C-alpha cells in the first residue's frame, strides 16, 4: 500500500451496522436522505437513456415556438442565440455520456444536469412550472412522431398528442448544471463533452470485450474510480459503479492492476448486464413524470447496514471523497 492509499483509508468512515456508525444527531439518525440533503441521486446512463428515448419520441419533428430562460446564469448562450432556436425543428434528442443533446435543424442544445438538474415533459404551457425552472423550450404541433422512436415508447400514454404544444422545463435547485446553446458553426467548449474527454458509452455496442480489455490497461487504480472515469467509459457514476462491482463480485477499492484476466472480463459483462437491467426497470418506473431518479431497486448502493441480496452479509457503506460507496465484504473480493 502506498502513502496515497493509506491516507485514503484514514479518511474513510466505515460502518457495517447501525451500531458501528459514528454518534449522530437525532436528525441524522432519521435517515440518509435527511443527513445528506445535497447529495441526491445524480443522473447516470440508465436515467438519461430513458429521458433521451422518451423525449425523442415526444418532441422530434416539432419546431420550437418559444424559449424562456428564467435562470440566465444556467444557460451558456446569448439571448440572440436563444431566440434563433425559435422556428427550428428538433431532429434528434439523444444522449452521450452524462450529456443530453438536442439537435435542431441548425443549432444544438446540450444539457449537463450535474447533481440536481431535472427535465420535465409538460403536455402544454398550462401545466404549472416547477420551482427553480431555469430554462424552457416550447414546441408546436407535428404531423407525426419520428420513425426511429424507441420501440418501448410507441403508443405510450404519456406521449403528447401530435397536435399538442408540449414544453420541456429544466429545473435545478442548486444551479450546478448547465444548458449550452450551440449555434451551427460555433465551437463552444462544453467541459467534459469533447470526444477527447470521453470514452465510448458504457452500453455502446462498439465497446466489445476486446476493446474493454485494451482500454482498461491504461487505468491501474481503484475499480470504483475506474468505472466513474468518463475517459475510460462514459455514463457511469456513483450509484451504478457500486451496482456493477457488486454484480462482478469485486470490491470498489480493489485496484485494477490486481485483477486476473477473467476478472477484467467479468467486470465487462457485469457492466453490460447491470446497465441493461436498469434500463429495463426504469422504462417501467420513470414515466410519466421523468423527474425523479428511481433507485430503490438497486442491490447495494445506499443500502448500508441492510442484508446483501446475494449472500445475506451486511452491506458496508463509506463516505470517502464526499460520496457514498456501498458494497458487500462477504461476497465481493
Ligand atoms: Zn454479499
Image (spheres, rainbow, N blue to C red):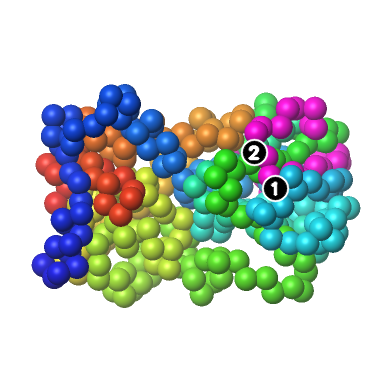
Query: Mark 1 = which residue?
Result: 71
- What residue range appears in magenta? 124-152
Residue 37, x across and y down, in percent: 42, 36
Question: Residue 215 location, x and y as percent?
Answer: 35, 72
Residue 128 - label: none
- Local packing at callout 2 (Cα closer than 10 Å; few below 14, some 14-19, many 20+) is some
Assess disc 1: are there few (<14), some (14-19) or many (≥20) residues with their C-alpha within 10 Å of its C-alpha: some
Q: Is residue 113 above or below residue 305?
A: below
Horizontally, residue 3 falls left or right of residue 184, namely left
Labels 2 and 1: the sequence-earlier one: 1
Q: Quadrant of residue 85?
A: bottom right
Whether 278 is among the magenta residues is: no
Q: Give the numbered dot on residue 132.
A: 2
**Residue 312, located in which quarter of the rendered image?**
top left
Disc 2: residue Cβ within 8 A of ligand 1's nearest atom: no
SS for dot 2: loop
Going 43% across and 58% down the picture, which residue do you hit?
Answer: 202
Residue appearing at x 43%, y 68% in the figure: 231
- Residue 204: percent from left, percent from top: 48, 59
Amino acid at each position: 500500500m502506498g502513502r496515497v492509499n493509506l491516507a485514503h483509508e484514514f479518511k474513510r468512515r466505515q460502518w457495517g451496522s447501525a451500531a458501528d456508525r459514528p454518534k449522530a444527531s437525532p436528525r441524522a439518525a432519521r435517515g440518509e436522505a435527511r443527513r445528506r440533503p445535497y447529495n441526491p441521486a445524480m443522473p447516470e446512463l440508465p436515467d438519461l437513456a430513458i429521458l433521451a428515448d422518451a423525449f425523442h419520441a415526444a418532441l422530434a419533428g416539432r419546431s420550437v415556438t418559444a424559449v424562456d430562460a428564467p435562470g440566465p446564469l444556467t444557460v451558456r448562450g446569448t439571448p440572440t442565440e436563444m431566440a434563433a432556436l425559435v422556428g427550428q425543428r428538433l431532429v434528434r434528442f439523444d444522449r452521450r455520456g452524462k450529456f443530453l443533446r438536442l439537435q435542431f435543424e441548425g443549432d444544438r442544445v446540450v444539457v449537463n444536469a450535474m447533481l440536481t438538474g431535472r427535465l420535465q415533459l409538460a403536455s402544454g404551457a398550462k401545466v404549472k412550472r416547477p420551482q427553480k425552472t431555469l430554462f424552457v423550450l416550447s414546441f408546436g404541433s407535428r404531423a407525426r412522431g419520428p420513425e426511429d422512436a424507441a420501440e418501448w415508447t410507441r403508443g405510450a400514454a404519456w406521449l403528447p398528442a401530435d397536435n399538442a404544444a408540449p414544453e420541456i422545463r429544466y429545473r435545478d435547485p442548486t444551479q450546478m448544471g448547465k444548458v449550452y446553446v450551440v449555434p451551427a458553426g460555433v465551437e463552444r467548449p462544453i467541459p467534459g463533452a469533447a470526444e477527447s474527454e470521453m470514452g465510448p458509452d458504457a452500453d455502446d455496442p462498439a465497446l466489445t470485450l476486446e476493446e474493454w480489455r485494451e482500454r482498461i490497461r491504461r487505468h491501474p487504480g481503484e475499480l470504483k474510480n475506474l468505472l466513474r472515469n468518463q475517459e475510460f467509459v462514459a455514463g457511469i457514476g456513483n450509484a451504478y459503479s457500486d451496482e456493477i462491482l457488486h454484480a462482478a463480485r469485486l470490491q470498489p477499492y480493489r485496484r485494477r492492476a490486481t485483477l486476473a484476466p477473467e476478472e477484467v472480463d467479468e467486470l465487462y459483462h457485469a457492466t453490460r448486464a447491470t446497465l441493461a437491467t436498469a434500463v429495463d426497470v426504469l422504462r417501467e418506473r420513470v414515466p410519466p413524470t421523468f423527474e425523479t431518479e428511481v433507485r430503490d431497486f438497486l442491490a447495494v448502493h445506499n443500502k448500508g447496514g441492510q442484508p446483501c441480496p446475494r449472500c445475506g452479509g451486511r452491506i458496508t457503506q463509506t463516505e470517502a471523497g464526499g460520496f457514498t460507496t456501498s458494497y458487500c465484504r462477504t461476497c465481493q473480493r
